[in-house]
Image (tube, coloured by chain):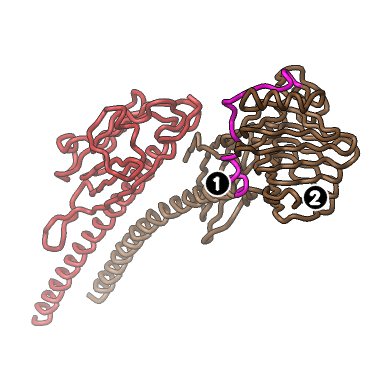
Chain colours: A brown, B red
Amino acid sequence: MGRAGLMLVMGLAVAFGYIGANLRDSGEALTVSQVGYYKYSFARNLARLGINRHLRYVDRGATPPTSATFESGSYTISTTSVGDTLTIVSTGTYAESSYVMRAKLLFTPKPFPMADAAVGIRAEPAELNFSGKAWVDGRNYSADGSTLIGSGDKPGVTVMNATDSANIYNSGGSNITGSPQVSTDASATDPGPFIPEYEQSAHYVFNTPGVVSGNYTFGSAPNPVIVVCNTGSADTSFSIKFTGDIVGYGILAINGNVKFGGGFRWYGLVIAYGMNNVITFEAAGTPEIVGALMVAGNEGASLTLRGTGDGGKVKYSSDALDNARRIGRLLYYSVIEWYE
Amino acid sequence: MLDYIASAIIFGVLALSVARIQSNINATLYQNTFTVITQQNAVELARQIEFDILKIGHHVRGQRIFYAAERRIQYRADIRNDMDTVNVQYLAGTITQGAITSNPRDFPLFRQEVTTNVRQNWGLIEFRITYFDSNNVQIGTPTNVADTLVKIRGINVKFTVQSPEPVIGQAGDSSWAGVTWEKLMYPRNLGQLNLVE
């Protein structure tokens, strides 16, 4: 009887042990199922976080990080840029779960004041004075201004009405080259409304009259920038004078009297947006604007180009202008694909 | 003699107790098993729906959603990112079609990709899709009007999954293990430029 009882107890113990193990296994399976979904969701959220964070950096024109960690998880970003298209691949990882997400963005330049001449004057009536050796050339040059492309030539100067056209033709004379030298284009874009955004997005701002010494390189061909020089145009006796050599790429917005005392080469668009604008090329050598120069449509605005050295040139270049459109802060992106 | 009678009674009490315990444990085991199955079904279905819905319109030029209703959605997408856009449809079946299980309320879900129609028995007792425009205003359904469908930006999916067999309680009552899942998703390819067919 004692042996039978012992066997019975042992049998019961084995049965309870088996049942207990099953209970534990099923509880564990529940946890595995829930945690598995959590890990999968968290990895996916990290991948999405990576793309969204990358886009915010792009918004600010900053360099995004390629990886980051968050709450024991991480994401890595890889990008491929082809022309105007940027492909972002984000991999979120949490525990043993990972999730890959892909987004493709199309970068598009914001509307840009399209220059239809080497010098486009949107002010009416307009005044363009040439002093000394300052030349305007509407023939289409390469982006660096070194060679003529042979097509896409523009007028030397465009204005809003025939009266201004005749006046500028007379005052410019042989200083203006183009096809034709001066033309009338009343439908041309006024760069004035673009100025507030350029001031807001400027990479460099000089707004105190005085001397700016030292050499400056503003941007580069693949990374053009916005420079604003604002002396106030009410009194042209106030001026900003750059004494060093200046090389710049992108948009140079000038309000007032700006003198370039050293070497000066600007590749892109120069906008004079004040009322009395004087741009003076003082140095010997060949100061140049390769792209276009535009005068905003302030009524009665004037522009004086002075070349007191060997001469200053404004050369039209559609390529240089196209580069200037691609200033990072003036691009917006559209999501054209999103795979997750 | 008294010892034998007493021991027989004690054995009987013990046997009854063990039987009762075993019955309870069995019920708990069933409950756990069905809960596991139900949760796993819910997780798998949630992952499948997230995978599919978030891809609506990927690589599609033109109309992306063709039919929107509470129990049915038909759309086009490059599901596998292999430049092959396909028509996908989710359609909730009827209770009659779910009569194969003991659960009187469940119905199957049909997922059709191109011409392949797969019947999925998740134990669904509720499946509801609602649609929202860019202002998060709900869009009336059902609709196959392209001008209405093009406004869809958000898709909310709610479903409840129950176990196919009942869990018998201690009082002999039956209950069903159940999981409810709901998510509002914003497929990013709706309303975006899509330059690749």
- Please, is residue A74 above or below residue A257 in the view? below
Residue at 43 percent across and 39 percent down: it is B188
Picture residue at 76% right of the left edge, 41% below the top: A279
| Nearer to me, A161 or A206 | A161
Quick one: B138 or B166, which is closer to the camera?
A: B138
Residue B111 lies, in percent from the top left, at: 31, 33
What element does badge 2 sit on? Answer: strand
Badge 1: residue crowd in 10 Å (few <14, some 14–19, many ≥20): some
Instruction: Please say whether residue A185 is visible from this viewpoint.
Output: yes
Three-letter residue code for mark 1: Leu
| Residue depicted at x 50% and y 29% | B82
Chain letter of mark 2 equals A
> Between disc 2 and disc 1, whose residue precedes?
1
Q: CA distance from mark 2 to mark 1?
A: 39 Å
User: What residue span does the magenta drawing correspond to?
Assistant: A178-201
Q: Secondary structure at mark 1?
A: helix
Residue in front for this viewpoint, A52 or A35? A52
Q: Quadrant of residue A86?
A: top right
In the image, is residue A291 part of the stretch drawn in magenta? no
Q: Could you tell me residue A170's position as x and y percent?
A: 76, 24
Residue highlighted by disc 1: A55
Locate residue B103: give its quadrant: top left
> Answer yes or no: do the residues labelled 2 and 1 have beta carbons within 8 Å?
no
| Residue A248, position as x, y percentages in the image | 76, 42
* Residue B6, horizontal then vertical, whole percent: 11, 79
Of all chains, the one bearing label 1 is A
Check disc 2 and report the residue beneath it.
A241
Q: Amino acid at mark 2?
A: Lys
Q: Is residue A107 visible?
A: no
